[in-house]
Amino acid sequence: MTGQLWGVGLGPGDPELVTVKAARLIGAADVIAFHSARHGRSIARSVAAPYLRNGQIEEHLVYPLTTETTDHPGGYQGAMDEFYAECAARLAAHLEAGRDVVVLAEGDPLFYGSYMHMHKRLADRYPCEVVPGVTSVSGAAAVLGRPLCERDEVLTVLPGTLPPDVLAERLRNTDAAAVMKLGRTFSNVREAFELAGRADEAWYVERATTADQRIAPLSEVDPDAVPYFSLALLPSPINNTFSTPVVRTEREGSVTVVGLGPAGPDWMTPEVRAAIAGADDLIGYGPYVDRLPDRARQRKHGSDNRVESERAAFALDLARKGSAVVVVSSGDPGVFAMASAVTEVASEPEYADIAVQVLPGMTAAQAVASRVGAPLGHDFCVLSLSDRLKPWEVIAQRLSAAAAADLAIAIYNPASKSRTWQVAATRDLLLEHRSADTPVVVGRDVGGASESVTVTTLGELDPSIVDMRCLLLIGSSQTRSVSRPAGPLVFTPRRYPG
């Protein structure tokens, strides 16, 4: 009777993630075999250590080389093939003697594992069974707290040894990905993510589930400090392409005010994405907070759009307790948004020690202007028609002054359900200083699913087409609208007459 060969997966590193079956077989085996480099330290054996018993035979299979060069006549592959043949012969001797042999494998035995080389050489000669284990990819996703893939998404697992251009092409054409075998390949892997335009979505996970676990954005990792037992993970892009975990460290509380841009994630800067990913608490107007995906260990606090000061104080109070707080605004936080409210409250003495940072975002004015050309190509001003925080008399005075100064004007908050008359009043005020054929751009939900952009004139501006989701661009005396087959082109020349 020959012995039984077992290929036993140990999981990603935490001994408690070894399966019940694997633990039982490790404890019962006559022979425990495991691999290591020439330094002699075996991660597999250290994971299995709690399940070993006294009296077991240990077969330490030491690789003759890892990344070194060799003078073997068959080169690197020849040296490794010879090594695996010698290891198989050593294990076969135990099996012939009737001893059961367990070959330890980190992760899963048949997923980039060394055990498979024994399996190919012994499984057709001796009774053999493979015990699957939790892969490092699953372990990394678990510690990140993010799904690998959802619904009909495609997950691609890639070796970091591929050339950067090949790796980049694979990354462009998948939803989610895991790149294995980092170590000395890390610089090439990061280059591939950059070539694919997906570096800001990727995370680095080292020794997942162990006490030495490390998590960081891929772009922030020092290539010289990357071990072999690490991987790059591109989590599921569903909901947002920046679905990333909260990595908690000991730190003082802070408040960061960010601009999400005028619409979806494509309009958001990488700097803002990173700040959101690192937050403990997200605070803002309900619909803006709802744009962001739910993440494990991250709290979201949505509120009404008329409580800016209260929202700012709440954010600062959380930061005082040690939380990393991100306050979100649409567009740019400094343009009719939360940066002003937060900095005003933060200037009070009780919040003097709280770090406050503002990260810019794409404004709605820029987004609308980009759809028609360059209507804001010369001097312009930005005004809000909302009279909730200032009286209409002040708004009218400023509109007249901007018109008299011949500035192009970007008008925010032009109307609401309860405020429907200001657009007509604005048009009439501006017509006192501008000709009726002055170009006007009405942008609605730019970047969103219901985007529409209308180019008209000041004289023909219909207030009924304008609502709270719109932004108006009023040209100066120099602004031109040119009809073209692909649509009108609106621009304000950089030169001014005289």
Image: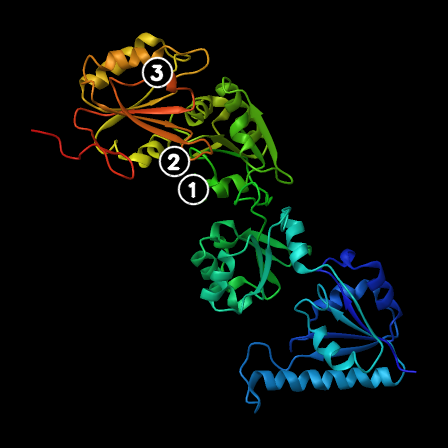
Image coords of residue 21 (percent x, y): 85, 62
**Quick check: 434 above or below 490?**
above
Crowdedness near tag 3: few (<14), some (14–19) or many (≥20) residues, C-alpha within 10 Å: some
Crowdedness near tag 1: few (<14), some (14–19) or many (≥20) residues, C-alpha within 10 Å: some
Q: Give the farthest residue toward the right.
A: 1
Residue drawn 20% across and 21% down?
Answer: 437
Image marks 2 and 1: residues in contact by CB distance under 8 Å: yes
Q: Depth check: 397 or 277 in front?
A: 397
Tell me the SS state at disc 2: loop
For the C terminus, the quadrant is: top left
Image coords of residue 447 (percent x, y): 42, 35
Q: Is residue 165 left or right of residue 21?
A: left
Image coords of residue 188 (percent x, y): 47, 65
Q: How is the image coloured?
A: rainbow
**Quick check: 387 above or below 132?**
above
Crowdedness near tag 2: few (<14), some (14–19) or many (≥20) residues, C-alpha within 10 Å: some
Q: Which residue is mark 1?
A: 269
Q: Which residue is mark 2?
A: 362
Q: Depth check: 259 or 454 in front?
A: 454
Tell me the SS state at disc 3: helix
Q: Which residue is mark 3?
A: 463
Which of pointers 3 and 1 indicates the residue nearer the eye?
Answer: 3
The amino acid marked with disc number 2 is Met
The amino acid marked with disc number 1 is Thr
Residue drawn 37% across and 12% down?
Answer: 390
Gap between marks 3 and 1 measured at Cα: 34 Å
Mark linked to residue 85: none
